[in-house]
Image: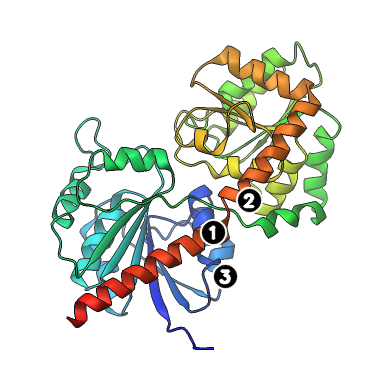
Amino acid sequence: MVKQNSIKIIFVVNNLKRRGAEQQLYNFITSLPPYIDISVFRFSNEDDFFPEIFNDERIKIYSSKYAGTYNVLKFWSLYKCLSNQKYDVLFTLGLGTALFLGRICAALTDIRIVYSCLNTFENFNSLHGLSGEYFDILNKTVNHFISKKSCSRIYRFLPNSERLTRRIRSSLKNYPVQTLYNGLKPDEFESVSGYRPDKEIKKIYFRFKGYPTVVQAGELDENKNQLFTLKCIEDIRLHIPDVRLLIIGDGVNRQSLREKCLTGGLDQQVIFAGQLSRMDCLYLMSKANLLVLTSNSESFPNVLLEAQSLALPVVTFDVGATGEIIKHNVTGYVVSHGNVKEFRESMIGLLTDKKLAQMMGRRGKKKMFRVFNMDKKAKRFLTLMEADLHRVNTASDQ
C-alpha cells in the first residue's frame, strides 16, 4: 500500500465554545483520516470549556489574545501563525473575523486552497454591510477581488444547507459555492442506549420518567425563545395535566425563565437540567417523547439531527434549514414562525398519539443516517480537496 502524503489543514474559527457549530467542527475533524495534519486557530482565548477538542492530541490549537472583532492585532496573530507553518488548506468557519482575516492572511502567506464553511443565515457582526446584505462590507470587498483571482489559487464557500447556498449564490458571481451538509456519527448514537449516567443525571431523569415529556436544548436566550415554549406548556397542561418540559442548556435568560415558571405555576412541569456534557444531554433527550425548536433564527440546527437520530419526532419553526432536516408530516412538523395555534396543536398531537410519534421518530432516524452522515460528509470533503490540490499543483508546474 502506498503511504498517503500528509496534508496540512488549519481551521480558522472565531471561538471554540461548546455550541452546535463547534461540536460539528470537532466531529468533522475527528472523522478525517490520519494523514490529515490538523491545526485550529481561534480568535478568542476565553472559551476553554470544550475539553474534548482541547485535550485531543491530534489537534494543535493556536490563539489570539487580542479582543475586538476586527482588531488589527488579530491580523498579526493569524499572519504570524500561518507564516511559521506551511499549510496546504485553510478552512474558515463562520462570518466576521474568521472569514475576513482568514482569507486575507491565506493570500499573504501563499496558501493556495481556502474553504469557507458558512453556517449562519444572519450576519451578527459589529461591522455591518448595507441593509439586506449577507456579507459585511469588508467581506463583500474580499468577495469582489477573489472573483477576479487567477486559477493558481482556489476559494470556495461551503454552506451547510441548500437554502443558504441559494441565498449566497444570488449575491455572488464567479465564486464557487457548494453545499456541504452537516453530519452525525452513527456509532455515537448507538452508544447512548448503553450509557450509564451519574446520580445527578438520574435524578433529573426520575423527575420526568413516565410522564409525556417535551425536550428543548440550547442556549437560554432571546433567540432560542424558550419563553414561547413555556406559554405552549401553560396551554397544553389543560389537555395533558401531567405534561413535562425538560430544558437543557444555560444562558442569560436562565433566571427570568425560572421566575416565569414560578409565577405561572409551572414549577412542577418544567425541569431545568443546566449545561450538560454531550453524552448526558443525548441520554436525557433519548428519554423524552418529542423535541421542539422555537428559535427566531437558525442556520442548520444540529439539535434536530440529534433528536431524529434518537428517534424523536420534532416540532419546529420554519427557520433556516429546518425544512431540509425535518420532512413535514413525515418525520415531524415544520410550522410557520409565530403560528402559536399550529405549534401547540402539533405538540399535543404527538404527545397523545404514541403510534404517530413513534412512526415519525423511526422515519427520522432512518433519514438522518442516510443523508446527514458524518462519514459521507468527510468523504465529500476529501474528494473535493484532493481534486483542488491536483488542480493547483498542476497549475504551478506549468
Compare residues 24 and 172 and report the one nearer the observer: 172
In screen coordinates, is 48 left or right of 77?
right
For marks 2 and 1, the one nearer the N-term is: 2
In screen coordinates, is 335 left or right of 329?
left
Instruction: Name the residue at 68% across, 47% down.
Output: 281
Residue on which disc 3 sits: 55
Compare residues 29 and 233 and report the one nearer the observer: 29
Residue on which disc 1 sits: 376
Query: Looking at numbered disc 1 in the image, what kind of residue is underneath it?
Result: Lys
Secondary structure under the numbered disc 1 in the rendered image: helix
Query: Looking at numbered disc 2 in the image, what kind of residue is underneath it?
Result: Phe
Residue on which disc 2 sits: 369
For marks 3 and 2, the one nearer the N-term is: 3
Other-residue count near label 2 (Cα within 10 Å), few / some / many at <14 / 14–19 / ≥20: some
Instruction: Name the residue at 19% across, 34% down.
Output: 130
In screen coordinates, is 27 left or right of 223?
right
Query: Looking at numbered disc 3 in the image, what kind of residue is underneath it?
Result: Asn
Instruction: Name the residue at 15% across, 65% down.
Output: 150
Compare residues 367 and 125 and report the one nearer the observer: 367
Of circles 1 and 3, which is in front?
1
Secondary structure under the numbered disc 2 in the rendered image: helix
Instruction: Please say if 24 is above or below 128.
Output: below
Residue 219: mark = none
For marks 1 and 3, the one nearer the N-term is: 3
Q: How far is disc 2 from disc 1 in space, using C-alphas? A: 9 Å
